[in-house]
Image (cartoon, grey):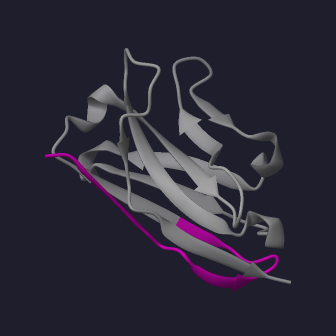
């Protein structure tokens, strides 16, 4: 059974930083692209960042230069380093896993709340 466990959220002031982590179990981690999504209050879930084929990492425009996605295959973990946080980054953040040959994000974490105060 596949599990993705998101941690690292919290309350931070604007301009601050947080690092989210997502530990995966029950899957062969190397065979999956990993990504992060978020759902702001009252809005739809949206893409944030992910590993892909080419280019190897992709980001939504609003986080480029501020967020960095990384992974440690030895620990089955994907990270999202979030710097220069803004109030509009407030959302529930979810990690997700997509099989290399698939276009669909199949597995999802339970989410971790990020709140940025102004």
Quadrant of the image occupied by residue 118: bottom right
Tell me the residue at 76%/69% (across/down).
85
Res 12 visible: yes
Across and down, in percent, residue 35 comes to 50, 42
Above or below, comparing residue 15 to residue 22 in the picture: below
Between residues 3 and 30, which one lies in front from this camera angle? 3
Across and down, in percent, residue 87 comes to 81, 73
Tell me the residue at 67%/73% (across/down).
17
Would you say residue 2 sits in the magenta stretch? yes
Point out the stretch of residues depicted in magenta: 1-19
Quadrant of the image occupied by residue 7: bottom left
Q: Going by the image, does 20 lie left or right of 27?
A: right
Across and down, in percent, residue 42 comes to 71, 63
Quadrant of the image occupied by residue 73: top left
Across and down, in percent, residue 12 comes to 69, 83
Would you say residue 62 sits in the magenta stretch? no
Tell me the residue at 78%/45% (across/down).
64
């Amino acid at each position: 059974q596949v599990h993705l466990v998101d941690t690292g959220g919290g309350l931070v002031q604007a301009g601050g930083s947080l690092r989210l982590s997502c530990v995966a179990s029950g899957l062969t981690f190397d065979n999956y692209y990993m990504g992060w999504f978020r759902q702001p209050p009252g809005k739809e879930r949206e893409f944030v960042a992910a590993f892909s084929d080419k280019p190897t990492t992709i980001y939504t425009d609003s986080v480029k230069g501020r967020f960095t996605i990384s992974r440690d295959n030895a620990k089955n973990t994907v990270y999202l380093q979030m710097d220069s946080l803004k109030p509009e980054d407030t959302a529930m953040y979810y990690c997700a896993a997509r099989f290399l040959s698939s276009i669909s994000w199949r597995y999802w974490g339970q989410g971790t709340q990020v709140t940025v105060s102004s």
